[in-house]
Amino acid sequence: MDKKKRTESIVTECIEGMMPLMRKATIGYYFNNLSIKELAVALNTEQSAVYSLVAEGREVIKKAVLSNHGEESHLQNNRYLYTEIFLSCGEEAVKTGVKVSGKKI
């Protein structure tokens, strides 16, 4: 399996393995472009909690990918990491069909 496919697989596995609230926050933020404030309202929680969930979700994914590919990974470029997260969140959103505030996350 090439590096790109392996990265996609790792990111997808990480998202699927997240706690439901973290998964919803991550998908809402990266795929649906919802703000932290919008997610807090939709998830009925504090903005600081949503911020922590999104940040922790991103770090879980980044650590998993870097541990697989090494520190010299192409993911030193955060834009590439965010693109991979966006694509995998989209796949997960389509699979689960979860909606928050009328938006699918």
Image (cartoon, helix red, strand yellow):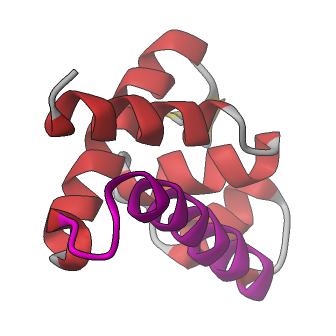
Residue positioned 45% across, 38% down in the render: 10
Q: Can residue 50 be seen at all in this image of the molecule?
A: yes
Quadrant of the image occupied by residue 13 = top right
The quarter in which the N terminus is drawn is top left
Q: Nearer the viewer, residue 25 or 70?
A: 70
Q: Tell whether 31 sits left or right of 92.
A: left
Residue positioned 51% across, 11% down in the render: 95
When the figure is inspected, residue 43 is found, relative to residue 50, above or below; the finding is above
Let me know if residue 89 is in the magenta part: no
Residue positioned 79% across, 49% down in the render: 21
How far across and how far down the image is residue 38, in percent?
Answer: 56, 67
Magenta region:
48-73
Q: Main secondary structure of the magenta part?
A: helix
How far across and how far down the image is residue 11, in percent?
Answer: 43, 42
Q: Tell whether 67 sits left or right of 40.
A: left
Quadrant of the image occupied by residue 19 = top right
Q: Nearer the viewer, residue 53 or 61?
A: 61
Q: Can residue 102 be seen at all in this image of the molecule?
A: no
When the figure is inspected, residue 27 is found, relative to residue 63, above or below; the finding is above
Residue found at the very far top of the displayed protein = 95
How far across and how far down the image is residue 5, in percent?
Answer: 22, 28
Q: How many marks?
A: 0
How far across and how far down the image is residue 77, in percent?
Answer: 15, 76
Let me know if residue 68 is in the magenta part: yes
